[in-house]
Amino acid sequence: MGTHTAYVAAGSNIGNKLLNCKNGIAALTKANKTVLKDWSKFYKTEPVYYKDQDWFVNCVVKIETPLDPFELLHELKSIERDAGRVSIPIRFGPRTLDLDIILYDDLVKNSADLIIPHPRMHKRRFVLGPICDISPETVHPVLKKNMKYLLDILDENEQSIIEYSCDY
């Protein structure tokens, strides 16, 4: 059983957003199912799609895991539930913790439960900015462009992200 490299985005806009993200990442490594290899800075980010909500705190982590993509997804959903995330009727609405698989090796997967790479990652400054902190040369397995290029071509007025000043 080999290990896989995955990038996971963490976000929160309810309660102590920074702590929610940090605790979610910690929970991911506590189960001894993943090893944290790198993490981005934390960012305060403007909501997209559904604007009538508080700003988010976001980051991206690089992990190594023996879990297959569906096992990893199950683990992430369990951590979200433990953090108090509840299902809400508003798509892209407020959440205590959101953990998404952004990339998993070079896998391209499109199933009812899981799409890898994340289908909207290339349109999201709050994903591309953090991933460029740790791995700007990583290539999107479908678009065949690296993360820095994808970030650079985004409309700079489309979404604000501001580096979060905090002690790590």
Image (cartoon, rainbow, N blue to C red):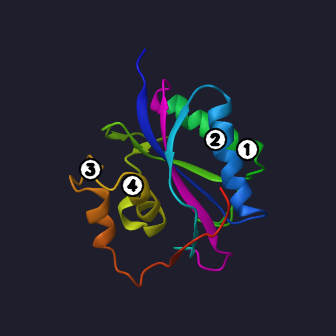
- The quarter of the picture where residue 112 lies is top left
x and y percentages locating residue 44 in the rendered image: 60, 71
Closer to the chain start, of discs 2 and 4, is 2
Q: Nearer the viewer, mark 3 or mark 4?
A: 3
Closer to the chain start, of discs 3 and 2, is 2
- Residue neighbourhood size for the residue with mark 4, other residues' Cα within 10 Å, grouped as few (<14), some (14–19), many (≥20): few
x and y percentages locating residue 9 in the rendered image: 52, 52
Going by the numbered disc 2, the residue's amino acid type is Lys
Query: Is residue 88 in view from this perspective?
Result: no
> In terms of secondary structure, where does tag 2 sit?
helix
x and y percentages locating residue 84 in the rendered image: 78, 50
State if disc 2 and disc 3 touch (CB < 8 Å): no
Magenta segment boundaries in residue numbering = 50-69
Q: Nearer the viewer, mark 1 or mark 3?
A: 3
Going by the numbered disc 3, the residue's amino acid type is Val
Residue 60 lies in the magenta stretch? yes
Find disc 2 in the rendering and name its residue. 77
Cα distance, mark 4 to mark 1? 23 Å
Find disc 3 in the rendering and name its residue. 139
Residue at the top extreme? Answer: 1
**Quadrant containing the C terminus in the rendered view:** bottom right
Task: Tell whether 43 sits left or right of 27.
Answer: left
For residue 81, the mark is: 1
- Identify the residue at image location x=53%, y=49%: 100
Find disc 4 in the rendering and name its residue. 119
- Identify the residue at image location x=61%, y=69%: 164
> In terms of secondary structure, where does tag 3 sit?
loop
- Residue neighbourhood size for the residue with mark 1, other residues' Cα within 10 Å, grouped as few (<14), some (14–19), many (≥20): some
Closer to the chain start, of discs 4 and 1, is 1
36 or 45, nearer to the observer: 36
